[in-house]
Amino acid sequence: MKFTLAWLKDHLETDASLDEIVDMLTMIGLEVEAVENKAAQLAPFTIARVVSAEQHPDADRLRVCMVDTGSGDPVQVVCGAPNARTGLVGVFAAPGVHIPGTDMDLKIGTIRGVESRGMLCSERELMMSDNHDGIIDLPEDAPVGTVYATWAGLDDPMIEIGITPNRPDCLGVYGIARDLAAAGLGDLKENTPEIISGTFDSPVEIDLRFSPETADACSAFYGRYVRGVTNGPSPAWMQQRLLAIGLRPINALVDITNYVSYDRGRPLHVYDADKLQGVIHSRMGKSGESYLALDGKTYNVEPSDCVIADDRAVLGFGGIMGGEETGSSPETKNVLIECAYFDPLRTAETGRRTGINSDARYRFERGVDPAFVGPGAEHATKLVMELCGGEPSHLIKAGQPPEPELILDFPIAEVKRLSGLDVPPVEMKVILSRLGFWVSGSGDILKVAVPTWRPDVHGKEDLVEEVVRIVGVDKIAPTPLEAHGAVGVKILTPIQIRTRRAKRALAARGMVEAVTWSFVSTKEAEAFGGGQAELKLANPLTEDMSDMRPSLLPGLLAAAQRNLDRGFSDLALFEVGQVYAGDAPEDQTTQAAGIRRGTAKIDGSGRHWAGNAGPVDAFDAKADAATVLDTLGAPVGNAQATRDAPGWYHPGRSGVLRLGPNVLATFGEIHPGLLEKLDIDGPIVGFEITLETLPEPRAKPTKAKAVLDASHLQPVRRDFAFLVDASVEAQALVRAAKGADKALISDISVFDLYEGKGIEPGKKSLAIEVMLQPKEKTLTDAEIDTVGAKVVEKVTKATGGVLRG
């Protein structure tokens, strides 16, 4: 929100300086983002008169001017402006002055052999407008030698403040003045628009055409016909204020609507009445309709849009932007002033769908004052009559604006309880009254009526906030935190701890963290077990973001494909984030997931002279999952791998890590059919871990253990090859072998699998290496043979396998 100091003082009687006003605005919650003081920027530019303007001897388009600056002898200036002439009064800049419009420092120069000791400036060089067709041409009576900005009224500082979405009342200068007056920085000037007495009935009728279900789209539509207007340029004071806040003056009628929007926070629209046909009405849009907007673009209308129309066509989106065909022009003689109240939610939805960002939309979607519909029409009518002349009709009305009546019980003790400030009750009443609240009562509980321009105030806490921000947050005494003698307890929750540890573990394995959208398409959601009706968004950003994600894998796969499309085929990505199995709180869980593609293995990727890296496989994903589980304290060593992975994995190249019935992780190669369906180039492997389902790690023992429990004795390795049924899983064989002697057997690994010639059908050969680690003495051959016999016995009993000869 931008405004100038003089504009503010139209509504605020104050002697406060610019610095005091800026400081107070920030203190009461209207944070100042910028202050532009043109008085300092334009101070070196003075009014000067051209004494003579002679043709340049070596250039047809240049003139050599002798300029009276009011400070002594005339100064020679070479000027190329077509309007440079003897007697012209303009704006002069001496050597050394910084020209803001060109961002250069002026120097004494020689132009085509003639010395120039200054410059006669255009409006663009002073950043007043984009006009640079000629130098500034001032009235003959402009005082030579005077600072131009002071004489022209350009020394009015511009203030820009940040408005939070809950303060639509401060989207008008009058609302800002009200807040400053409540803070004691002056007195608010009464500026209630006077009622204009019309002299005739409007020849243009207005109407509301809504069903009961959509009647809130535009609850009130007021208008006034003004005939015989003269639509020329707006006065200089209005143009200067609009320019100061970044708006381009167009003509008096358009400038009035822009001025009222910023002055009183009340958007308006003015139609050329001679271009209207039939009854002007507000209704919901119809499929197939469109209109050419004031921004020069054509927009399609949807049935969910609130529009203004006549009997011929749509004239504009209600509360957002009018149409070009019925807009005012210099030839306009008769106008219809529109002042309506549009539903904030519908306005925001239409604005977001169309992408139109207008000042009207910005205000209506935050909530304008519903009680100012009638006064707004009166205020606009008065300005039109003052600046454009004309004769007004009687005010015409359709509908009634909603004027909520909210009266709150306000226990004055709440201010002390919630803020710590001890504010006298009388001061509370004065503050609330100056802010526009109606206050009654004298006991411990006051009755406070909320004004119509404050849609953000709903309860007693909001009233406390109003009192505190006006009294001053800086008045709240700082209170140090209570010191504790002992070490504080953990601050992070178990899930927060697991999230951080999982990220560190995966990053240490060479994976790159990705952050993807929580929304996926319906096709992606259904492919990963989602797509339920309760997980569909009521108002999705795009069609590809229609469902809450049931897994992190869809987003990671899409990211992998985007990288592949740009030439990065070998990559490993991970993400830790929320996934959704339903709309209940317990259905929202935290998942750690990762994918690898190409040759992005833990030990390196790509081509190398010593040997190229191989493609990733399901065991890489299993290793990633196991690392996370081990980092989080899950007993991964006791986990069993089963084949019942979800359907989005390859059925023969995937698995599930389980601890009894509890699933710790799923891993494997993503199903080729699914990748093809999602238009993603594979193969890709991945894993998923739900952090909430992991068991809590066992408490650490209170007694200290040795850091390293290593034996000084040489380990012994023995190989065993077993002939087993083809259906026997390797882990069953390994588990049986480990049970032969848990004290001596320290490790078992599978090093060979053979099926084919020499092996009968339905059988396979599995070879394992068993490592024996003695702790007390070196093993004898007999002791080693005894352990070997136990291994064979256990495997045979558990799997039916026999030792190969």
Image (spheres, helix red, strand yellow):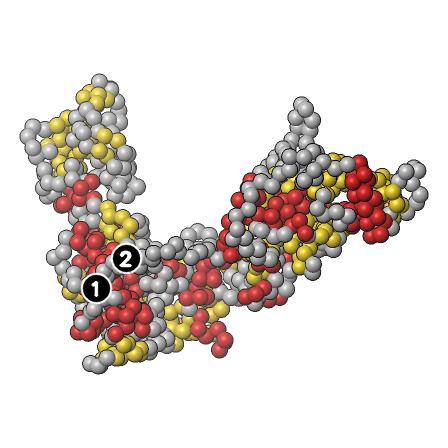
Expressed as whole percent of the image width and height from the top left, the position of residue 412 reads 25, 75
In three-dimensional space, the C-alpha distance between marks 1 and 2, rounded to whole angstroms, equals: 22 Å
Whole-percent x and y of residue 18? 17, 51
Residue 196 place in picture, x, y as percent? 24, 72
- The residue nearer to you, when weighing 500 against 72, is 500
Q: Where residue 639 sits: x, y (%)?
A: 68, 52
Total labels drawn = 2
Looking at the figure, which quarter contains the N terminus? bottom left
Identify the image quadrant of residue 319: bottom left
**Three-letter code, disc 1:** Val
Local crowd size for mark 2, using a 10 Å CA cut-off: few (<14), some (14–19), many (≥20)? few
Near-viewer residue (482 or 265): 482
Task: Tell me the SS state at disc 1.
Answer: helix
**On the image, which quarter does residue 532 sit in?**
bottom right
Given residues 197 and 109, the one toward you in this image is 109
Q: State which quarter of the image contains the C terminus.
A: top right
Specify whether 44 is left or right of 574. left
Q: Residue at label 1?
A: 471
Name the front one of labels 1 and 2. 2
Q: Residue at x 61, y 50 (%)?
A: 629
Q: Residue at x 17, y 47 (%)?
A: 155
> Mark 1 and 2 residues: CB-CB less than 8 Å, in contact?
no
Residue 480: numbered disc: 2
Q: Identity of the amino acid at label 2?
A: Pro
